[in-house]
Image: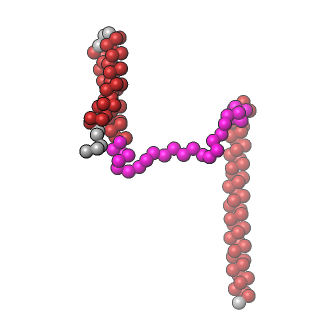
Amino acid sequence: MSKERARRRAEREAERERLAAARAEREARAARRREMRARLVGPVAGAVAAVLPRPSRPVRVARQRGYLARRRRTENAVLAVLWFLVQVLAWILLDSWMARLGVFLGSILLLPVLVTIVFDRRS
């Protein structure tokens, strides 16, 4: 029984040493990366970065997934492309700056109405 315990203890110690070596390698790699970044960025950028506020936690930007979110993104993209095409056509077909400005302002004001009429989700 004691030989079995000794063998298991030796295995645990070997595993701990392997994990410690891997952790030391990761830390050494991170230190080399920090040193390389410090050399590449330079002292001026380091001083600027020291003055700028850092977020308390990493900023995670992720968009929603799923059918409804995908549909909403598609609808928004279609609306943006149509709005852009209206602006391009107004720019090409109209010579007056006032007319172009009128189309621009009118399209901005009518866009929410168009969204409500075309993409009404209540029904």
The answer to whether residue 77 is magenta is no
Task: Using the image as rendered, state which of residue 52 and residue 36 is in the foreground.
Answer: 52
Task: Using the image as rendered, state which of residue 50 and residue 1 is in the foreground.
Answer: 50
Q: Is residue 111 above or below residue 38?
A: above
Q: Is residue 8 above or below residue 112?
A: below
* Relative to 57, 64 lies left or right: left
**Quadrant of res 46:** top right
Quadrant of the drawing holding the C terminus: top left
**Quadrant of res 112:** top left
Residue 6 picture location, percent across and down: 73, 82
Residue 87 picture location, percent across and down: 33, 22
Residue 48 picture location, percent across and down: 70, 31
- Bounds of the magenta segment: 45-72
Residue 88, visible in the rendered structure: no
* Relative to 11, 72 lies left or right: left
Residue in the picture at 69% in, 66% down:
18
Residue in the picture at 71% in, 90% down:
1
Residue in the picture at 31% in, 13% down:
99
Q: Residue most toward the top? A: 96
* Relative to 58, 28 lies left or right: right
Residue in the picture at 28% in, 15% down:
93
